[in-house]
Image (cartoon, rainbow, N blue to C red):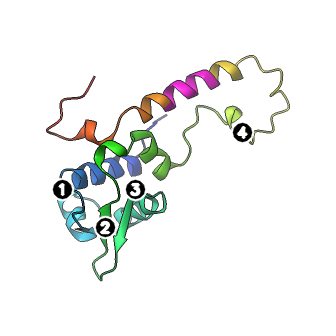
């Protein structure tokens, strides 16, 4: 099982690259793809997801232009993962819309819920800034 899939890995690389420049810098899809060695079609799909989730935005133009909406320290790793992969969940049984017939008597649901909250807090505790090359904030 992988927690961080390839699309999220690409999203991290895209965003760390963008965050390494002054706020407001505009990037073309082609330039990002070349710099990060990514297929343009896959890159566009990831940027669309990040745009829908208000992490990046587009500027009209023929090349596909994008920029960060917020500073690196305002974008959490958890937010990026959920924007690209969807909700992070250890198990379907702890989702709100779970219709499991044993949900009220399950002995593991509470423990999984506790772990889920801790994982979410951990991921939300790190930001893009923690991953910039000139920062030394790794644990």
Q: Is residue 106 above or below residue 5?
A: above
Look at mark 1 in the image and give the residue it sits on: 22
Q: Are marks 4 and 2 in contact (CB under 8 Å)?
A: no
Mark 4–mark 2 Cα distance, whole angstroms, equals: 34 Å
Look at mark 2 in the image and give the residue it sits on: 66
**Which residue: 52% across, 24% down?**
118
Q: Are marks 1 and 2 in contact (CB under 8 Å)?
A: no
Question: Residue 46 location, x and y as percent?
Answer: 40, 59
**In the rendered structure, which disc, 3 or 2, sits on the residue that comes first in sequence?**
3
**Which residue: 27% across, 59% down?**
38
Question: Residue 56 location, x and y as percent?
Answer: 37, 60
**In the rendered structure, which disc, 1 or 2, sits on the residue that comes first in sequence?**
1
Give the secondary structure at mark 1: loop
**Which residue: 40% across, 31% down?**
125
Eye-nearest disc, 4 or 3: 3
The crowding category of the residue bearing disc 3, from other C-alpha atoms within 10 Å (few below 14, some 14 to 19, many at least 20), is many
Closer-to-camera residue (67/90): 67
Place residue 63 in its image quadrant. Answer: bottom left
The overriding secondary structure of the stretch rendered in magenta is helix
Look at mark 4 in the image and give the residue it sits on: 96
Mark 3–mark 2 Cα distance, whole angstroms, equals: 10 Å
**In the rendered structure, which disc, 3 or 1, sits on the residue that comes first in sequence?**
1
Q: Is residue 116 left or right of residue 53?
A: right
Q: Which residues are magenta?
A: 113-120
């Amino acid at each position: 099982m992988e927690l961080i899939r390839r699309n999220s890995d690409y999203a991290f690389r895209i965003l760390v690259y963008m965050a390494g420049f002054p706020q407001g810098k505009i990037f073309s899809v082609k330039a990002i793809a070349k710099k990060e060695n990514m297929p343009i079609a896959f890159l566009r799909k990831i940027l669309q997801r990040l745009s829908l989730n208000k992490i990046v935005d587009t500027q009209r133009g023929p090349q596909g232009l994008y920029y960060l909406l917020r500073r690196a320290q305002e974008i959490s790793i958890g937010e990026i993962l959920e924007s690209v992969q969807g909700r992070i969940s250890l198990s379907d049984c702890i989702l709100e819309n779970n219709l499991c017939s044993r949900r009220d008597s399950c002995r593991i649901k509470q423990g999984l819920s506790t772990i889920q909250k801790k994982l979410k807090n951990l991921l939300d505790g790190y930001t893009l800034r923690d991953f910039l090359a000139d920062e030394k904030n790794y644990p």
